Amino acid sequence: MASRKDGAVAEIEKKIIEAFEVFDHECNKTVDVREIGSIVRSLGCFPTEAELHELLAKVEEEEPTGYINLEKFLPVMTKVLLDRSYQPIPEDVLLHAFEVSLKRIFIKTKCLFCLSGEPFTEEEMEDMLSTALDPETNTVRYRDYISMMIVDET
Amino acid sequence: MCVFIVDYTTSMCTPLLSVLTAIRAAILIQNWYRFTKARLETRRRYSLSIFQSIEYADEQDQLQVCNFHFFLYKHPGVSQVVDEGLSLTEFENKIDVPDSYYGPRLSFPLTVEDANALLHAFRNEQLLHARYVLQLLCETRRVLKEMPNITHLSTSYSKEITVCGDLHGNLDDLLLIFYKNGLPSEQNPYVFNGDFVDRGKNSMEILIILFAFLLIYPNDLHLNRGNHEDYIMNLRYGFTKEVSKKYKDHGKLILCLLRDVFSWLPLATIIDSKVLILHGGISDTTDLDFLNALERNELKERIPTTRLSKHIANQNVAGKTQHISSSGSTEPSGSNLPPDHALEEWKQILDILWSDPRSQNGCTPNKSRGGGCYFGPDVTAKLFERYNLKMLIRSHEFKPEGYEISHDGKVITIFSASNYYEEGSNRGAYIKLNPELIPRFVQYQVSKYTRRQNLQERVGTIESSALKSLREKIYAHRSELTSAFAQYDLNSTGRISVSDWAAAMESVLQLELPWRMLRAQLVQMTPNGEADYMSCFYDLKIGQPTKEPALVETLCRYRRDLEIIFNIIDKDHSGLISLEEFGQTWKLFASHLGIDMYDESLDKLVLSIDYNKDGHIDFNEFLEAFHVVHRLEKKANS
């Protein structure tokens, strides 16, 4: 039915506008370009940094002003949500990832996270450690960490 | 510093595959981690959004109460006048300080020793005795009276000037500022930009400290009036309660004197003729010369803006400004409306105490505050050009980092109350202004936890606090919400679409919030993705009898307003209104609303409200009175 589809699209657009407005301090339909990552992720997407850069290229002005307009962002983001791009990582895959990265490698994990992949900044590494590290045993109890951070997103 | 489980037993010739797997795993984790961070940031933002929307909506609500009180104030016999002749020695003679009192004993003129004694006492949660409070206020009034409306300062002698914003009763923040930045002195001048009181629990102590330093260093400690230095605001936002509780019998006199002192606070400060410091902001009609010339102490409280907008409308119709002077006085002669000149003065002051900067050009009425305006960069530029200014420093708005720069660097907002909404909600900050007038910002955050909460915990605290406030509001509007939901639910299934639910919430509560984001915390979903709208009201434990839910909800919503009205009538803050006081006030109220009131029915009404027949009406009986009105109304409407 065309009307139901329209309804679904309208609902998605409203969701996007809401997320956008949370970061729109001055209520003038623009957000700082550095917040786009947070907005996209708050809508339930898991883009990599590379994918985010691609998305930014589509929504930025020809001459980047440091701000992103809602009217450019909305259609692009609507498509992202309709296409279900940037799918979330299933919990079991995540668990396995932690197991792999924390056991039996000769690279120190901090190096791994800060120097390879899509490297963490000092700040990000510090923050993750402060939450994930169990101060008594000086280890990461990654199962607990995962379940602590996962919020029911339904 | 961390140690992960690392196994060195594998040989150095670990296959490349293994490394690649590790890197792939790292990417996944980094991706997931950034997702959770973004989610946390979103939760933090919308929690602050909730706090702020509710706060502004509250401020607007009390416009109605303002209306009534303004009316009351202008009637003879009702307004309070503090004897100008009160002096230090009179207080000394009239109020006895017992030997058992171990707090600071002030001797006037004050010295640094007195200030240190006060700081020490307040750190140990002692109270200053009422006699000294009254003497301090008396002296403060005397000193403030000599000051012009706009103070002019200079950064000569290579002094840095420190500017602080809203403190709102947070004593810990003031003590932290003094610890980091040093006490006020000739070498260390300060400007405090209003809103010293309300909300926090040490408003009185902050005032005492600031006034003490004002008396000791009158040329180096400067105060600007904020919108909360206002009797009506204090009734609603907690300062009046704090004073009544701490000072009981003497509370009334202290509050009276404070009202006067507040009205004598200067309106603005200008540094080196280039930096303008005032509490709220500006409008396109702000006239510094006019502001400097008016009688600032005549204007005690904010008056209802409905009268103002009428006045402005009249001006527009007439096409020119009307200034009706009535022998220099701004008091109304017999009619209810003050002359236009007084209204113009009100507007100018309202604008500088209540306005907020925005990035759009122009000057529009400030809808969320119900007073002052939103002013754009063009308004700022014009004012700067007119008065040859370089910077505007203002406060009045909460900022998560304690400060914010807008209008291309021309406007700075400085907010000094950390953890304003909740533990961990924001930092506070102050400005150090050097002789070149370049600002430097110092941020801080007090914490009641010895271990610093990590971001996860802090956001959790703020979020649950914000949601609690929001749920209270939801409960207070239960019946309106229920009928709004029902309008979408034509077949009475108990379920509506998320879209309809969000629309209903927004239209009833009048709060611009991300409802779809908050949905999971506020309402339960059915398996087919619809909202089970009545589940909004589950688990809301408000401690009231549930005999008449609609009434309870009304009382919940209006309790604060009723409390304020009660406090206005209860002039000596004893917690009791005499039957006569009530009768008088009710008559005024009725005539204000244009209702005819016969004396016999008033007597009957008054007697019926005094439920326990002790000749006085306490707050519960007052609430009960509205219960009766509500019941009768329901009967009439059913």
Image (cartoon, coloured by chain):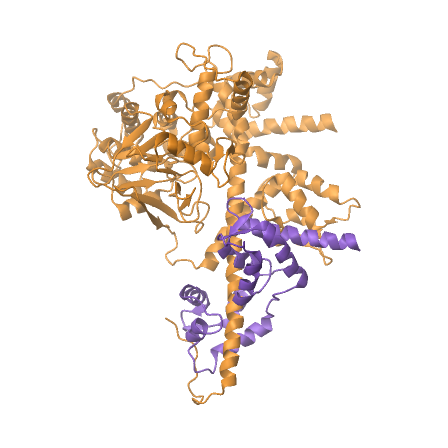
Chain colours: A purple, B orange
Comparing B615 with A99, the one in front is A99
Q: Report the number of discs.
A: 0
Looking at the image, residue B221 lies above or below residue B427 = above
Tell me where residue B163 appears, x and y as whole percent: 32, 40
Quadrant showing the N terminus of chain A: bottom right
Comparing B150 with B514, the one in front is B150
Whether residue B637 sits left or right of residue B335 in the image: it is right
Tell me where residue A45 appears, x and y as whole percent: 59, 62
Looking at the image, residue B134 lies above or below residue B126 = above
Tell me where residue B100 appears, x and y as whole percent: 26, 35
Looking at the image, residue B105 lies above or below residue B51 = above
Taking the image as drawn, is residue B408 in sight? Answer: yes
Q: Quadrant of residue B432?
A: top left
Residue positioned 61% across, 70% down in the render: A90
Residue positioned 61% across, 60% down in the render: A153
Taking the image as drawn, is residue B573 in sight? Answer: no
Quadrant showing the C terminus of chain A: bottom right
Whether residue B260 sits left or right of residue B136 in the image: it is right
Whether residue B552 sits left or right of residue B634 in the image: it is left
Q: Quadrant of residue B484?
A: top right
Q: Quadrant of residue B609?
A: top right
Comparing B9 with A42, the one in front is A42
